[in-house]
Image (spheres, helix red, strand yellow):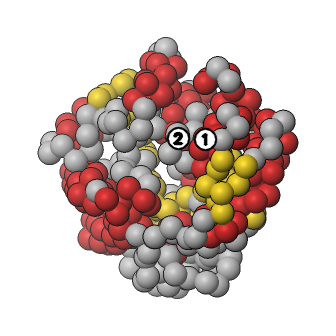
């Protein structure tokens, strides 16, 4: 059987690295595009991609998704079977201080991707969104069919915009698109700007950790290995334009396009203090907590309804926070020499 080729944008990133590794393990040819920017330590990105570059079926490309013509050239050369677009400017807080980075990477980058897919259509185009698009919604768990009109950060606003942009291309050009909304992803090789790293490094150094909203926060913590398994299975769940406009109950499929949005989350909302407790147990250290008010752009809780993912793939994330945190802390200690 002919090998299938997948483009993974953001391949040196946290999620892109794990997804690329899984695809390579399954015999896919992977073209990995990454800019290796300095939003966080480029050495960590390099260490991730060095592992991928050792694999025969991996092709590394360095560049920015918003660079005019870069994606068009890759699509023309490789004629991808599937594309998983993970490259983006991430982070809620950073979007308050540097919104232009989000406009360029998230909006212009997605535009370049859609134009390339229009010219050289893959069988399935999958794009990362975020649970942050649910914004001010208070009804839990979040369902893909919920209205999402009140984003609370510019980061979330750009991600909601990419969902709408992709829907228009799916409708106009019959382009099969799946958007997935990630929740709070953690695990080995995680980003140093995220809570697991910040908490673990401070706790093990005997320094205080910042606990926002005085600890009254809940998150749907999703282990990265579970997340990328969900993405891998969604590659096969290609949406089709409904012939009669009738959508199955609970499905987010568009009535006018082969376009769907899917939550990829653990399906459980965990108290932030319980997550910190798991780090304390895994590291055998006690946290010094500095209780602070809510940060601008943040939300008090997230919780995924993952029933659509389960319906489409027969799979849902299943790693408990206790088990996932043990794996993260073990990697953290080994990588950072703690």
Crowdedness near tag 2: few (<14), some (14–19) or many (≥20) residues, C-alpha within 10 Å:
many
Decide which of 224, 246 is in the foreground and name it. Answer: 224
Percent x, y of residue 196: 64, 45
To which quarter of the image does residue 12 belong? top left
Judging by the rendered image, the residue that carries numbered circle 1 is 197
Q: Earlier in the sequence, mark 1 or mark 2?
A: 2
Is label 1 in a helix, a strand or a loop? Answer: helix
- Residue 223 visible within the image: yes
Left or right placement of residue 92 versus residue 67 in this view: right
Is label 2 in a helix, a strand or a loop? Answer: loop
Decide which of 310, 148 is in the foreground and name it. Answer: 148
Judging by the rendered image, the residue that carries numbered circle 2 is 191
To which quarter of the image does residue 254 belong? bottom left
Q: Quadrant of the C terminus?
A: top right
In the image, is residue 132 above or below residue 138?
A: above
The reply to whether callout 1 and callout 2 are in contact (CB within 8 Å) is yes
Crowdedness near tag 1: few (<14), some (14–19) or many (≥20) residues, C-alpha within 10 Å:
many
Left or right placement of residue 221 versus residue 130 in this view: right
In the image, is residue 172 above or below residue 309?
A: below
Identify the residue shown where x is 38% and y is 79%.
256
């Amino acid at each position: 059987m002919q090998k299938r080729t997948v483009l993974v944008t953001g391949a040196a990133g946290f999620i892109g690295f794990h997804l690329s590794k899984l695809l390579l393990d399954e015999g896919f040819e992977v073209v990995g595009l990454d800019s290796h920017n300095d939003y966080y330590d480029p050495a960590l990105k390099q260490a991730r991609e060095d592992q991928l570059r050792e694999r025969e079926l991996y092709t590394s490309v360095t560049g920015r998704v918003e660079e005019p013509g870069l994606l068009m050239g890759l699509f023309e050369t490789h004629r991808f079977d599937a594309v998983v677009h993970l490259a983006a400017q991430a982070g809620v807080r950073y979007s308050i201080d540097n919104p232009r980075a989000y406009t360029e990477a998230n909006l212009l980058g997605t535009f370049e991707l859609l134009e390339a897919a229009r010219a050289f259509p893959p069988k399935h185009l999958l794009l990362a969104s975020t649970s942050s698009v649910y914004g001010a919604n208070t009804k839990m768990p979040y369902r893909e069919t919920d209205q999402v009109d009140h984003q609370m950060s510019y980061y979330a606003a750009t991600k909601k915009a990419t969902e709408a942009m992709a829907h228009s291309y799916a409708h106009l050009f019959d382009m099969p698109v799946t958007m997935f909304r990630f929740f709070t992803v953690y695990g080995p090789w995680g980003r140093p700007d995220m809570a697991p790293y910040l908490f673990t490094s401070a706790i093990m150094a005997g320094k205080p950790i910042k606990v926002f909203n005085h600890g009254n926060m809940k998150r749907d913590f999703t282990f990265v290995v579970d997340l990328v398994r969900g993405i891998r299975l969604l590659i096969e769940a290609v949406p089709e334009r409904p012939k009669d406009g009738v959508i199955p109950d609970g499905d987010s499929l568009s009535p006018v396009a082969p376009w769907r949005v899917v939550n990829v989350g653990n399906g459980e909302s965990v108290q932030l203090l319980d997550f910190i407790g798991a780090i304390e147990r895994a590291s055998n250290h006690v946290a010094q907590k500095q209780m602070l008010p809510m940060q601008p752009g943040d939300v008090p809780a997230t919780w995924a309804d993952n029933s659509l993912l389960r319906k489409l793939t027969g799979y849902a994330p299943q790693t408990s926070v206790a088990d996932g945190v043990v794996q993260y802390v073990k990697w953290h200690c080994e990588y950072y020499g703690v």
